[in-house]
Amino acid sequence: MTSPHHARRSPHRWVRVGIPLVLVLVWLVGGSVGGPYFGKVDEVATNDQSSFLPESADATQVSERLPDFLGDDTIPAVVVITGDGELTEDELGEITTVSEEIAELPGVVDGVSPPIPSEDGEAVQMFVPIDSSGEVRETVEEIRDLLEADLPAGLEGWVTGPAGFTSDLTEGFLGIDGLLLAVALIAVFIILVIVYRSPLLPILVLLTSVFALCVALLVVWWLAFADIVVLNGQVQGILFILVIGAATDYALLYVARFREAIGEGSRRWDAAVRAWRGAFEPILASGGTVIAGLLCLLLSDLATNRALGPIASIGIVFSMLSALTFLPALLALFGRVAFWPFIPKSPPAQIPEDLTQPVKGFWQRQARLVARHSRPVWIISTVVLLAAAVGVTQLKADGVATSDLVLGYSEAREGQDVLSEHFPAGSGSPVYVIVPESDLADAAEILDDNAGVDAVAVSSEDSPTGQAAVSVDGGEAVIEAFGPPGTAAPEPTVSDGDVLLIGTLTDAADSVEAEDAVRELRTSFDEEMGQGAALVGGVTATDIDSNDTSIRDRTIIIPVVLVVILLILMLLLRAVVAPVLLILSVIVSFGSALGVAALVFNGVFQFPGADPAVPLYGFVFLVALGVDYNIFLMSRVREESIVHGTRRGILRGLVATGGVITSAGLVLAATFAALGVIPILFLAQIAFIVAFGVLLDTFVVRSLLVPALSYDIGRAIWWPSKLSRGEEPGAHDDREQPMGASSAAEPDEDLVAEDGHALTRAEYRRTLEE
């Protein structure tokens, strides 16, 4: 036996057992502390869209000042009730009784309007202010239950308006804590059982993911509690899925290295250490790339995007820590038993020297295909991906109506349709305009002249309803009195010299027509009263500002993400050409995923459109995660190229990483697909785009396009590093190394270290260098 002078003996038994036990104990404590916070997320989460807008947005400023004019910080609910025809006096009396009962419910503040009949007499509406600082969904559900229980036969009621839609949206997110996690974990477990054919190893991998999520959630909860980040159901769902998927991917990479070491005869401690050394750099580079891409979201003007960046990055940090500490500790304790009943007893198969002959094994055949037909493979793959990307032209990502955010049944959406049949569709979701008191008449006239505004009122504490109708006569504002003849007209509420005008929109607040009306109002105010003289807010204005900001964000952030990831790849691979090729490959892959998604959304699911943030989120996740797999592949290729030359290194890297990356891709696609169980349009679209894009990256880009293109180019992919000139230690000129030749840098079969394990290539190279 040969005992190289650099080989080290295994540490004492108490070290080999003690260190893993301490690491496992630390993670158990972290998981036990963080686990209960799954049930406390709603204490720090919010789904109020206006809270995500930039502070400079008009809608944000109006939202912050509304309590000054309307009293308590409330969110309006609109109750609409219809009968079989024109409502009778008895039915109107019953409705009045119900309205009084609604006013007594907890969460409903003073100011419930009396029932307001429609012009056709077939419906009534009531405006119910709900305390926005309380449990809006619970209050809305209590109103709905009361309507169902107390309305007499023949009458039917709905709760719609901003509070109704908020309730339905919140209910849609309720499955995140239980259903989403259960579906994701079950899907991952099934895939892992199929891949490893072991009952124990999948459990160890899932424990790695679950404990990473528990500790990440603990940190995020306290950051949200301290108002450092904004947490909502959308961000929460993405955090859960991202951590489960990323932690499992990193765990699979480590397991592949550990399995390789066990198969070569290493003992469990030595295998754990060897696997850690082999997996550390790819996992760190992969996680760092994802974090860098996510932190680019801090450039967004939307608080929800800015929050997702650091929140998801925290999840990735703990995913890496768990895969590099908790899992190695578990495997160091369990050893080869973790793979029972199919314990690896031999090194993984490699490609044969002579590729002109038939080969065995899927990835060996894939390598043979790449070696013999590299140029046709990458050209055909590129053409297919570009053809799929043509569908991007059909993507409608300019915003969707609030009523379409919830998939499936929505009482608020149904109530909105009923409301629009009997009243102005914008009832309950008006446009708010804050202007100086001296400009009240001019502003009221601009509102009244707009075809999209049905009625104009001004906020007034003196009015029983909190507002009074206003018109313009001879250039002066005329406020109508509420009550019998002779009643004095109420005075408008003034705050810091400003008054609040309320315009009832003709069309539904989330409709394209309402958006056009609000945009026209803003233009008219700026032209006739001066830039910034009037602040326009409300539900429609909030949607407009959100969409406009999202479009601005994706225009700025997408190029920044590309540059940042490109620089990271250059540092990791110590080259320029390879990183550029990898970035181009994931761009083409993203375009293909988005193109196919557009066709599926329009033709199969018939979605009404997409939020402008959908392409941005899809890009950040697919580019960062797609580069992950290329990092796994190319870091191994570079390692093999140093010893065997570039072209053979590409083939060996493809065979060595094929199984683990395919498994990781399936796991990540399954976890993101699990988002589809949450009935929210945004999450369903992200689920499809990312899941489909990851599968494209796994089975086309990483398995065919990148290896074939790199093989065709040869060692020039490492330009300008020394490896591109064949000057790396142990590297061989591809032209001088025929495919059938053996590598002089391979260790002899009988070369072993003092502890008995066979030397790795890295150890053997160090021996030669020393």
Image (tube, rainbow, N blue to C red):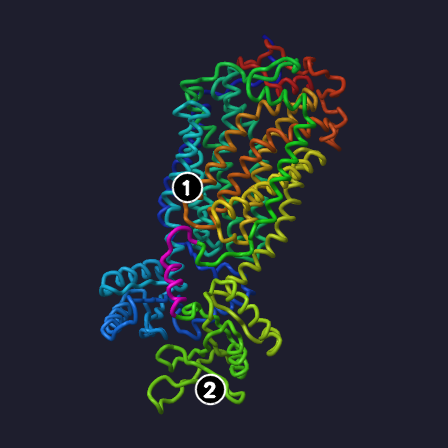
In magenta segment, residue 417: yes
**Residue 633: quarter of image:** top right
Do we see residue 133 in this rendering? Answer: no
Q: Is residue 318 above or below residue 164?
A: above
Residue 729, placed above or below residue 58: above
From the top left corner, tell me how far across and down residue 741 is, in percent.
70, 13
Amino acid at the residue labelled 2: Val
Q: Which residue is mark 1?
A: 214
- 424 horizontally vs 263: left or right: left
- Local secondary structure at mark 2: strand
- The residue closer to the viewer here, 450 or 216, is 450
Q: Position of residue 150 (x, y in %)?
A: 23, 64
Secondary structure mostly seen in magenta is helix
Label 1 to label 2: alpha-carbon separation? 60 Å
Rendered-image quadrant of the N terminus:
top right
> Circle 1 — which element?
helix
The residue drawn where x is 37% and y is 46% is 175
- Please tell me which residue is depicted at 42% across the width and 34% down the height of the picture: 187
Tag 1 near tag 2, CB within 8 Å: no
Q: Is residue 585 left or right of residue 122?
A: right
Q: 122 or 568: which is nearer to us?
A: 122
Amino acid at circle 1: Cys
Magenta part of the chain: 406-422
Q: Nearer the viewer, mark 1 or mark 2?
A: 2
Q: Is residue 445 above or below residue 176?
A: below
Q: Dot 2: within a 10 Å radius of its alpha carbon, few (fewer than 14), some, or many (20 or more) residues?
A: some
Instruction: Examine the rendered structure and indicate whether residue 342 appears above or below residue 457.
Output: above
The residue under label 2 is 478
Q: Is residue 353 magenta?
A: no
Q: Quadrant of the C terminus?
A: top right
Residue furthest to the bottom in view is: 486
**Residue closer to the observer: 163 or 513:** 513
